[in-house]
Amino acid sequence: MPPTRAIQIVALAVLTSLVTIAATGAYGSDPSPVYETRTPSGNGIGKVYMGREIANVMSHYSMSRLDRPGREREERTDLLVEALPVEADAAVADIGAGSGYFSFRVAERVPDGVVYAVDIQQEMLDEIERRKSERGVDNIETLLGRIDNPGLDEQSADLIFIVDAYHEFSHPREMGEAMYRALRPGGHLIVVEDRAESKSRSSGKLHNMTEAQARKEITALGFRWVRTESFLPQQHFLVFQKPASS
Ligand SMILES: C[S@@+](CC[C@H](N)C(=O)[O-])C[C@H]1O[C@@H](n2cnc3c(N)ncnc32)[C@H](O)[C@@H]1O
């Protein structure tokens, strides 16, 4: 074969594989080109989304931290729960529910509704089930999510809230798209994250977010930013809405 023909064949093969990568998103080990990789920092996973390195997942071995006695006073979790816009018969999803700290408190606010407690760690859900039996609570449903999809039915939730968990989602784009589908039109998404702008929270490194970053990522999914509340001592309370006409 003449050398020019061989070069043409190699060039065509390279071009074909590049087109395939672009079309399927099969980029390296990650299926989606919306992510970049870098050397992981202290508590990061080395995966970058919209300029933010994603944090590692808090292990279920640290579960007791979520239920520490001083948490309500430190974080004013009572105010957080009160501020969630829910009716008594609402279907509410708590994504990244952990040990159910918020699921149980919100379940009291929706006595005629349901709380879907979603997590990717079965150990967290086992603990929620144990507490449900112990406390006689019957309006919480545990759901084992995938890292890229909480597994909620389309338009099954009136409200989705995420406390201290969004920054850990290893697939925030896919999770966000699935949450968008799961929310009924006009429904709200509440994202609560430690303020990365605050010097006192910098010890948490990637386990926090700036308001600007959270707004950038969530509005990119099609949600409308409604407002950011600052009544919590350490966290942003961001309110988004799925457009009523979608
Ligand atoms: C720091 S804990 C917060 C738990 C709870 N929201 C609270 O504030 O008490 C974060 C939780 O998010 C969960 N998580 C991380 N990625 C997730 C994903 N893609 N889908 C659902 N849960 C996820 C973790 O397993 C962990 O239980």
Image: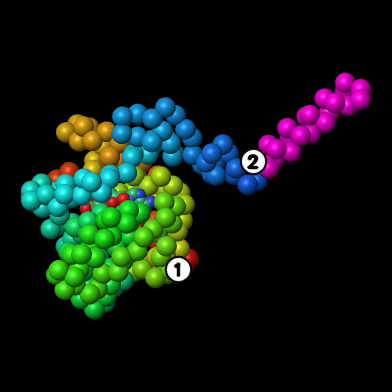
Q: Secondary structure at mark 2?
A: helix
Residue in view at x 55 percent, y 44 percent: 31
The region drawn magenta spans 1-20
Tell me which residue sits at (14%, 70%) in the image: 135
Residue 213 shows in the view: yes
Between 117 and 87, the one lying in front of the other is 117
Residue beneath label 2, please?
21
The amino acid marked with disc number 1 is: Glu
Magenta stretch containing residue 8, yes or no?
A: yes
The answer to whether 228 appears left or right of 146 in the picture is: left
Percent across and percent down for residue 18 are: 68, 36
Quadrant assignment, res 152: bottom left
Label 1, residues with CA under 10 Å away: few <14, some 14-19, many ≥20: few
User: Which numbered disc, 2 or 1, marks the residue that appears first in the sequence?
Assistant: 2
Assign the magenta stretch its main secondary structure: helix
Q: Amino acid at mark 2?
A: Ile
Q: Is residue 209 magenta?
A: no
Q: Which mark is residue 35?
A: none
Compared with residue 80, is residue 208 higher up or lower down, i.e. above or below? above
In the image, 160 versus 6, the foreground residue is 6
Residue 202 in the image: state x and y as whole percent: 22, 32
Between the residue at mark 2 and the residue at mark 1, the CA separation in whole angstroms equals 29 Å
Q: Any mark on residue 154, and which?
A: 1
Q: Ligand 1 closer than 8 Å to the CB at disc 1?
A: no
Q: Position of residue 235 (x, y in %)?
A: 21, 46
Q: Nearer the viewer, mark 2 or mark 1?
A: 2
* Residue at the farthest top position: 3
Q: In percent of the image, x 39 and y 58: which residue is there?
A: 145
